[in-house]
Image (cartoon, helix red, strand yellow):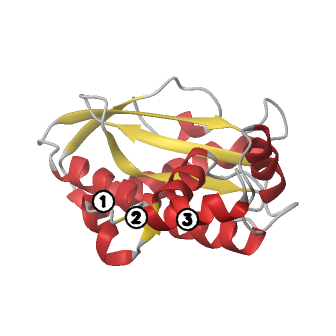
Amino acid sequence: MTSQEVHDATNSEIIRVQYEGFGDLIKLDGKSFTFATLICGKTYQEASNLLREAGIDVPSSQYFYRIQKVILEKAKELAEKSVKNHALQLEPGTVITIDAHFSHVRNADECEFVAMGPKGDIVAKFVIVRSRKGKAGNYTGASCQMESVAADQALQILEDTVGKGIVDGFCHDRDNKSRNIVAC
């Protein structure tokens, strides 16, 4: 496919995504939307290699990152809205499950924490704690304390969202240091 064919095809396939307000935010061509979604989070070099392997002309890096940024921001906004809606549906006396996972077994530089309701729905905002060692992060301290910090943040967000008295208890695997802040 030549770049002119790609350009003509994308111009003829312009779509408005109506789901959850996408249409009001941006007007995208279908192929760019698909590519950016499929390779979310990939670097331009990784993505361009995938596109070349598929026989597709690669857009400029500026165009690629612009589309990817818009989609990632909207996806994050929709995820946060969904999490808040699930949290607001909790009934008094609910027991939630909490846990985290790390980027590495030892000396992790990132920890992702989640709290789930009885139906498996995520009920507290995803909390990601990143070390300030390499890239910009939001945490300084030992990696073994990351889960505790993330738990504090997530549970505070949950309490601010639904109020006190809704969550009656927590189910946790009691690993790491978070067992000191969460009573099971």
- CA distance separating discs 1 and 3: 36 Å
- Asked if labels 1 and 2 touch by Cβ distance under 8 angstroms, the answer is yes
Q: Which mark is residue 77?
A: 2
Q: Residue at x 44, y 58 (%)?
A: 75
Q: Quadrant of residue 57?
A: bottom right
Residue 94 percent coordinates (x, y):
20, 35
In front here: 38 or 135?
Answer: 38
Q: Which residue is mark 3?
A: 8
Task: Choose between 95 and 41: the one closer to the eye.
Answer: 41
Q: Amino acid at mark 3?
A: Asp
Decide: few, some or many residues near mark 1? Use Cα within 10 Å; few <14, some 14-19, many ≥20. few
Q: Mark 2 or mark 3, which is nearer the start of the sequence?
A: 3
Q: Nearer the viewer, mark 1 or mark 3?
A: 3
Residue at 73% in and 75% down: 62
Mark identifier at residue 151 = none
* Amino acid type, mark 1: Lys
Q: Is residue 79 left or right of residue 137?
A: left
Tell me the amino acid under the disc marked 2.
Glu
Figure quadrant of residue 80? bottom left
Residue under label 1, please give it.
Answer: 81
Q: Are there few (<14), some (14-19), or many (20+) residues within 10 Å of tag 3?
A: few
SS assignment at label 2:
helix
Disc on the earlier residue, 1 or 3 = 3
